[in-house]
Image (cartoon, helix red, strand yellow):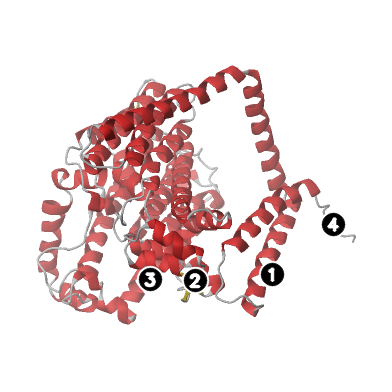
Amino acid sequence: MQLKIKRISLKDFFIVFIPCMIWIILFWNSLVWDYSEFSKRKFVTYFGVTLLVLTISLLASLSKKFVQHREKKEEEIKRVISNIKNNPIKYVIIISIYIGLAIVAGLLSVITYKYKIFSRGGLNGIFLFYLLIEWTFYTIYNCRSICEKKPEILYFLVAVLLTSFFIFKNFDSFVSWDERFHFENAIQFQRLFTGNDLEADYLYSLSNGQMPLDEVQNIYEKHTTVSNSFVFAYHNIVYLPYYIGFVIARGLSLNVRIVYSISLLFQAIFCSFVISRAIKIIPYGKRLLSCIGLAGTFLFLNGCFSYDPWVVAFIALGFAHYVKNLEAIDGTLTLKEAVIPLIYLIIGCLPKAIYFPLVFLGVFIPTRKFDNKKTKRKYILLILAAAIILLASFLLPTLFSSTGQAGDTRGGTDVSAIGQIKFILSNPVEYTKILLNFMFNSYLPYEVTGSQYLSFFAYLGRVNNFTLPLLTIVVTAFLDRNMTDNKYIAFRIATYVIIFASIILVITALYVSFTPVGYNTVNGCQPRYLLPLMFPFYLLLVPNGKIDINYKKLSLISVSLMALHYFYAILYVVYL
């Protein structure tokens, strides 16, 4: 029997190889070693990365799917280029208006700064504020012709623009929750290759982001290092977008101020893209997800060092696939298609496995949707396996590691995870009273928590008036629906039961790890932990049915209102 050897497509090979080689050069240039001579570690790093690039390039050149994807993208690029060629004046005008708006923003910022209209803020920060206001609403206007059929594009562009404020504002210190911890995890990938941290990064982190960036730059230019080891953890993957930004910016030898901003920008683009994919995939609720993805607290976190945006984005994507599977034609759902939401939920739960009950939603996909009953049984087994793995990922360290048993030291000296677990098991009725009292009197009431997950900006402050974004989300939830099959009532009920169970787990986790033993309330349980649950909650809040509505206007109005409140919140917490 004669073996058929696939021919390598040189075109496809070099389409992958050239960008990868550029990446290798940037990667090499971004690494700082504490020794200059040849070493085994250097050789393994350089050889391993080069071999990986060659392997990826060869596999791509032999892959039919890659060729099909490349051809599809080539056609899309040709259509865009053709559109620009056919309407050059239109695009010249658009670019000119963006430039003109930047000039107007510059003039407004000079006037505002000179006459001290704002009580706080430097000239550059005020210019950024005005610029993003003008560019955001002009971008919304430019997307008016595509937002009905492609609301994901409108969301992505607006989300990246709004997030850019916190990326490029350059505050005098870390401003988000646990941002120093997340910054250290983002920079530690260098340790994997070199066994050290840059001294500039190390000192900047040690100062909690308060070291002047000019001073950080001076230290960085010396290329001094501090020995440190890479701490392997499965959830480190969530920091890869940050590290990619570090590699590109440092590979280009950019200023450290720009390095940190580009790192944040890559994470913001990545998470905004993931949510835009969820918007594209889900059959209905597209405008609702756009609104939730533009909540002030989420955008703020997406512009800081944090893993919360990763969790929110991938849980939204996983849930979007669940809804897509619900709408599948009976007898067509394969195991491969059914597993997709499960994979995304696992990825989303990596840093916060406490949301693991969400994987059980797959159990309530009707059996008639699957291509056969055997597929459904296999799928349930995979769900159970995923749930066990996620549960073990945070339960085992708590029970069997010394640090896990001790709890979070930030909660005080009286914190003991093991002691708290013993208290709960010994006093289940008393703990239930503590749990319910905290949940319904302190944690869930909108007058208490609404501002904290819609317009809470950590150490910068919060805006207590959250009526506009809340009404926008609720009204959009009622208008943006097309769920006509009433047989999904089991999935709807299961979603709310699982949301409720997830909230209980979040509160209990903080009671165990962050609260003194036997305390009558729960410490450290912040409303931002509700963000991953907002989309499932609001999507299924309204009854089934279809409303005849102009989705173009709904997209433009809802996104504009969320952006309007976002800028109002920034004005309040940053400049007034």
Q: Is the C-beta separation of discs 2 and 4 under 8 Å?
A: no
| Secondary structure state at the residue bearing disc 3 | helix
Q: In terms of sequence position, does the residue under pointer 3 or pointer 2 come before the other?
A: 2
> Mark 3 highlights which residue?
392
Q: Residues within 10 Å of mark 3 (few under 14, many from 20)?
A: few
Q: Residues within 10 Å of mark 2 (few under 14, many from 20)?
A: some
Write the residue at 22% across / 33% down: 117
Q: Position of residue 230 (x, y in %)?
A: 48, 73
> Mark 1 highlights which residue?
47
Which three-letter amino acid code belongs to the residue tagged 2?
Thr
Q: Is the C-beta separation of discs 3 and 2 under 8 Å?
A: no
User: How far apart are labels 3 and 2 at the CA level?
Assistant: 40 Å
Q: Nearer the viewer, mark 3 or mark 2?
A: 2
Q: Residues within 10 Å of mark 1 (few under 14, many from 20)?
A: few
Q: Is the C-beta separation of discs 3 and 1 under 8 Å?
A: no
Write the residue at 30% across / 49% down: 531
> Mark 4 highlights which residue?
5
Q: In terms of sequence position, does the residue under pointer 4 or pointer 1 come before the other?
A: 4
Q: Is residue 508 above or below residue 562?
A: below
User: How far apart are labels 2 and 1 at the CA level?
Assistant: 25 Å
Write the residue at 21% across / 45% down: 462
